[in-house]
Amino acid sequence: MDKLVVNGGSPLTGPLTVGGSKNTALPLMAATLLADGPSRITNVPDLRDVRTFSNVIRVAGPAVSFDAEANTLTIDASTVNHPVAPYDLVKKMRASFYMLGALIGRTGEAKVSLPGGCAWGPRPVDLHIEGMKEFGAEIELEEGYVIASAPGGRLTGGSFRLDPSSVGATINLLLGAVRAAGPSRIENAAMEPDVVAFGRALQDMGAQIDGLGTRTIEVQGVDTLSPISVRNTPDRIELGTFMLMAASAGAPGHPVEINRGTHEHLGQDFKNRLAETGVDVEYEDECVTVTRPDRIAPVSIETAPYPGFPTDLQAQWTVLLATTDGTATVTDTIYDDRFKHVPELQRLGVDISVNGNTATVEGGPPIKGAQVMSTDLRASVSLVMAGMIAEGTTHVLRVYHLDRGYEDLEGKLRRAGIDIWRDEYEELSDRDETEAREAA
Ligand code: EPZ
């Protein structure tokens, strides 16, 4: 199994380059199933999630080829003859659930594994299911699968209000609506740049969509869509992550350049909060320059749907707060259990505690390297961030979580001044652990 090893203390000098967006690439991949022919997506990051979703799509029949060197994905959806997304693949990545909208939109039927747990449990998909029913699908839940069919092979279209607003449900409902027989309306729709870029690609394929980027999206169903050649957007969360790394691990007064991001996709709230900390940020066309000041003010944040503070950057923000000299809080209003990085940060000496959906960080105590465990994608990158500013060496274990969403992070950071490398290690199995304990 892989881990990342970081020797803390060397400043992040940059420059850094932002890759293609994970959360835009995945819906773009799903969209190609709606067209009978070969589509091409460029600027696709070489990530575990992209490779996993490629395998999910192959099961349904399309030919998928990925040129990792060129970051280019080709999906030929001429054949979609097995409208199934199996549990063993869907369980690896929640976004595989986009196959519900893609398959029912293309073939009029779908058998898609629930992403994990039940439809209404942790990380639910009830909005996806209720919305698809409203658009004319008949849906059964059987043995952990969603079995959906459109009477007569085509959804009718309909009107559905998302409560709460949901990125994934907006994407799935658009996938089902664009080839429906009649009009559809999605209220309280997600406005994330990922959703807007995905919707614009559907428009380029011939879909009739109004209201992208607003809370109300109207769709007029069409009979067919054409294959597409589209460039994926830059990853806004990688950009935000790099900015917070520069703010935390940059040398005071030394600017760090971050290239090829689209800073408008960060949302104004993130920019405002970062400015309040005293970190100096210059936004140019495709370059953001971040300069850490001598002192960073502790600023509290609260996540919200776009254009609010992204929940995917809250773990990284807790590490920035650890480098301040005061107290501040991080509240996640989107997920109330997204603090699995907290016990690991405590192992590094960060003074952080959680009460409900709010973490409180007391900046100041020295951060000291240790072995820490990744638990999910953004938690693991916050541990790397902490390792960069820790005294001594930090081992971030189970880095397969990180590989889901960051392409060659250790290579990018090493070229930007950080003493970091990838290493292999064996995890003690339960049996080994018992034997080790008995031998002690
Ligand atoms: C997307 O997940 C992103 N994933 C997540 O990024 C991101 O954290 C999240 O949006 C919020 O911005 C991808 O784009 C692949 P939601 P998604 O549906 O679509 C509740 C990362 O790190 N909800 O917008 O699954 C849900 O429980 C990942 O890259 C329902 O109640 O998120 C949550 O509280 C992690 N019922 C809220 O809505 C539903 O049917 C927002 O979730 C669906 C969602």
Image (spheres, rainbow, N blue to C red):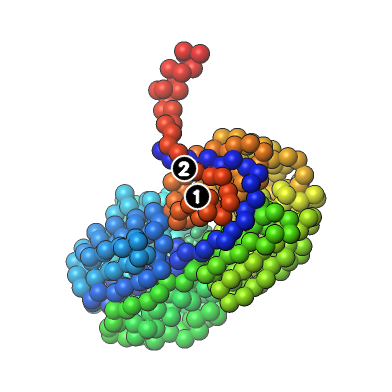
Task: Give the side of residue 81 with respect to residue 258, left or right.
Answer: left
**Residue drawn at (69%, 40%) of the image:** 367
Task: Give the side of residue 186 with respect to residue 345, left or right.
Answer: left
Q: Amino acid at mark 1?
A: Glu
Label 1 CB-ligand 1 distance < 8 A: no
Where does residue 45 sit, x and y in percent of width and height?
A: 41, 62
Where does residue 302 sit, x and y in percent of width and height?
A: 68, 61
Where does residue 214 sit, x and y in percent of width and height?
A: 55, 80
Q: Could you tell me which secondary element the residue under label 1 belongs to?
A: helix
Residue 174 appears in view: no
Q: Nearer the viewer, residue 417 or 19?
A: 417
* Disc ID at residue 179: none
Report which residue position mark 1 lands on.
410
- How far is mark 2 from mark 1, CA to CA? 7 Å
Residue 349 appears in view: yes
Circle 2 residues within 10 Å: few <14, some 14–19, many ≥20: some
Relative height, residue 380 to residue 136 (above, below): above
- Tell how many labels: 2
Report which residue position mark 2 lands on.
422
